[in-house]
Image (cartoon, grey):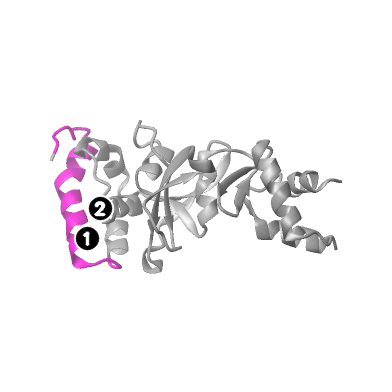
């Protein structure tokens, strides 16, 4: 079997795989193939669109926006992307990746720059408050409503107040207060004041005045 065919067969059920994963695959099969040969094969496959390069060293067999986060594990989708995935806003937005990895820039091109995503470094002490959610035909980690609200304020991803309506309806105040214990006083006060001001109106379906 040709190397390209082996790669496709081995990773057909994976969302993403890395250059090192290919090395391990070949090592397990006792195949002595040089890194240069692997690189040439991968480059050829990328050009032919039989595999796709998400970012340097990370690949997928399908070109899909929702695979982006898996190139930055550990991660979850948060912010505006979490609202989109949970159908809490109608807009189609960029995938917003919260990762504990170092981040050099907030906006990043993937798949050769054809798709842009939002990338945030999240300190490990704030890496909580997410769960697996079905999105299309895959399962992805997505922040829950309470953590989504906190992240929106923490990363200054502001929206018009009307766009918070459906999210506020999902907020459980006790759970939110529990999450906010990990945060500084300013973030805690800002989020709680916002909820105090707007949640009751949102619950009544009357959140229609911008702030």
Image x and y of residue 194, in percent: 18, 50
Magenta stretch, overall SS: helix
Image x and y of residue 65, in percent: 51, 40
Q: Which residue is mark 2?
A: 153
For marks 2 and 1, give the CA distance: 7 Å
**Residue occupying the point 65% across, 41% down:** 46
Q: Which residue is mark 1?
A: 187
* Magenta-highlighted residues: 181-210
Whether residue 134 can be seen here = no
Magenta segment includes 109: no
**Residue occupying the point 31% across, 54% down:** 151
Q: Nearer the viewer, residue 112 or 170?
A: 112
Residue 39 numbered mark, or none: none
Q: Nearer the viewer, residue 119 or 140?
A: 119
**Residue occupying the point 74% across, 44% down:** 8
Q: Are marks 2 and 1 in contact (CB under 8 Å)?
A: yes
Image x and y of residue 17, in percent: 64, 52
Image x and y of residue 41, in percent: 73, 47
Pointer 1 local density, CA inside 10 Å: few below 14, some 14–19, many at least 20: some
* Quadrant location of the C terminus in the rendered image: top left
């Amino acid at each position: 079997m040709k190397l390209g065919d082996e790669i496709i067969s081995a990773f057909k059920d994976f969302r993403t795989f890395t250059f090192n994963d290919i090395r391990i695959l070949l090592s397990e099969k006792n195949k002595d193939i040089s890194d240069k040969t692997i690189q040439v094969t991968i480059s050829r496959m990328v050009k032919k669109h039989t595999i796709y390069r998400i970012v340097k060293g990370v690949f997928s067999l399908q070109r899909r926006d929702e695979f982006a986060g898996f190139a930055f594990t550990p991660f979850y989708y948060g912010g505006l992307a979490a609202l989109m995935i949970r159908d809490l806003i109608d807009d189609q937005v960029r995938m917003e990746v919260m990762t504990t990895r170092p981040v050099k820039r907030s906006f990043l091109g993937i798949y050769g720059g054809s798709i842009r995503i939002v990338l945030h470094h999240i300190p490990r002490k704030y890496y909580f408050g997410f769960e697996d959610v079905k999105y299309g035909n895959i399962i992805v980690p997505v922040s829950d409503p309470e953590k989504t609200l906190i992240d929106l304020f923490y990363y200054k991803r502001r929206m018009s107040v009307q766009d918070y309506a459906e999210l506020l309806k999902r907020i459980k105040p006790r759970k939110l207060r529990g999450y906010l214990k990990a945060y500084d006083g300013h973030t805690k006060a800002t989020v709680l004041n916002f909820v105090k001001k707007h949640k009751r109106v949102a619950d009544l379906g009357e959140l229609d005045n911008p702030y």
